[in-house]
Image: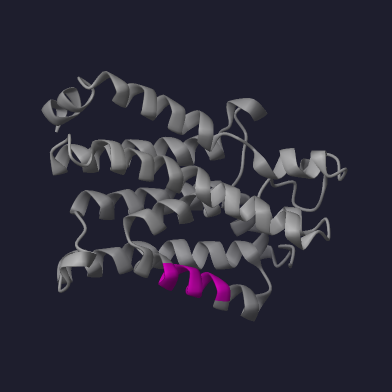
């Protein structure tokens, strides 16, 4: 593993992509868009989060959709750029290691943004961009779980927790089955999804406490 990482970072441009992934992930689009649109600091509205759900509490649905799209795109696009630039250069195992680094740093950038004194969002949309890159079919299933839970309970955090909890099992099933060539993924990507779930649950600890008390805000 260490040898693979050393070999990966011997490609100097890889370091630039990894650094960029963190800072692109750190861009607080929800905060920027609400300020530009005259709604002030989104952190002083509703839950205080910078994500699309809290942007929706401004009453501007278009702004919330745009925030969601940008937060998903900031992880997906840089992963896609890495794919088209390195797919024919790096060995497959090194490429997957690079995907893992890019994914984690994009997510950590969003969750602990240096532009917000290392505070940030819960990472749901940015994580969704990663899942869509790994396998869009399982990502759609995960999105469906989130949607059904939110519609049933009117609680965004419960939807996020439910979808993130189930997603590693879905990816593990896909890894173990590999019944279609197109859907093949590596065990390292399964571990990546599991780690993403852990990070999301850690960021949702305050929400979990409110869910237990029955005081979590509704959509």
In the image, residue 23 lies at what x, y percent?
A: 52, 29
In the drawing, does residue 153 fall left or right of residue 58? left
The residue at 67%/59% (across/down) is: 65
Q: What range is drawn magenta here?
A: 140-147
Of the pair 192 and 214, the residue shown nearer to us? 192
Q: Is residue 144 magenta?
A: yes
Up the image or down, 36 lies above or below 152; here it is above
Q: Residue furthest bottom?
A: 152
**How was the colour assigned to the protein in this rendering?**
one colour
Residue 96 image point, x, y percent: 23, 43
Examine the image and state in which quarter residue 28 appears: top right
Horizontally, residue 59 falls left or right of residue 175, namely right
Residue at 69%, 47% (x, y): give it.
49
Residue 25 lies, in percent from the top left, at 52, 37
Instruction: Inspect this view and state whether residue 90 appears.
Output: yes
Say which residue appears at 44% left-offset and 33% top-offset: 21
Residue 174, above or below 199: below
Quadrant of the image containing the C terminus:
bottom right
Residue at point 86% right, 40% down? 40
Residue 15, quarter of the rendered image:
top left
Question: Is residue 3 a member of the stretch shown in magenta?
Answer: no
Question: Considering depth in this image, is 195 or 9 the residue closer to the camera?
Answer: 9
User: In the figure, is residue 159 to the left or right of 39?
Assistant: left
147 above or below 5?
below
């Amino acid at each position: 593993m260490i040898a693979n990482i050393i070999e990966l970072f011997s490609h100097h441009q890889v370091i630039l992509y990894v650094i960029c992934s963190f800072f692109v992930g750190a861009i607080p689009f929800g905060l920027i868009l609400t300020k530009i649109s005259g709604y002030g600091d989104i952190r002083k509205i509703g839950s205080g989060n910078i994500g699309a759900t809290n942007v929706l509490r401004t009453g501007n649905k278009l702004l919330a959709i745009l925030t969601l799209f940008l937060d998903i795109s900031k992880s997906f696009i840089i992963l896609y750029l890495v794919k088209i630039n390195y797919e024919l250069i790096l060995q497959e195992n090194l490429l997957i290691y690079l995907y893992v680094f890019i994914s984690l740093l994009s997510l950590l950038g969003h969750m602990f943004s240096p532009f917000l004194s290392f505070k940030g969002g819960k990472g749901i949309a940015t994580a969704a961009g990663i899942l869509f890159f790994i396998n869009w079919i399982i990502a759609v299933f995960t999105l469906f779980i989130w949607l059904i839970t939110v519609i049933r309970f009117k609680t965004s955090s419960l939807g996020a927790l439910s979808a993130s909890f189930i997603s590693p099992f879905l990816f593990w099933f896909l890894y173990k089955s590999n019944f279609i060539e197109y859907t093949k993924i590596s065990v390292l990507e399964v571990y990546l999804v599991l780690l993403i779930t852990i990070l999301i649950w850690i960021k949702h600890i305050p929400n979990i406490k409110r869910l237990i008390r029955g005081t979590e805000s509704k959509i």
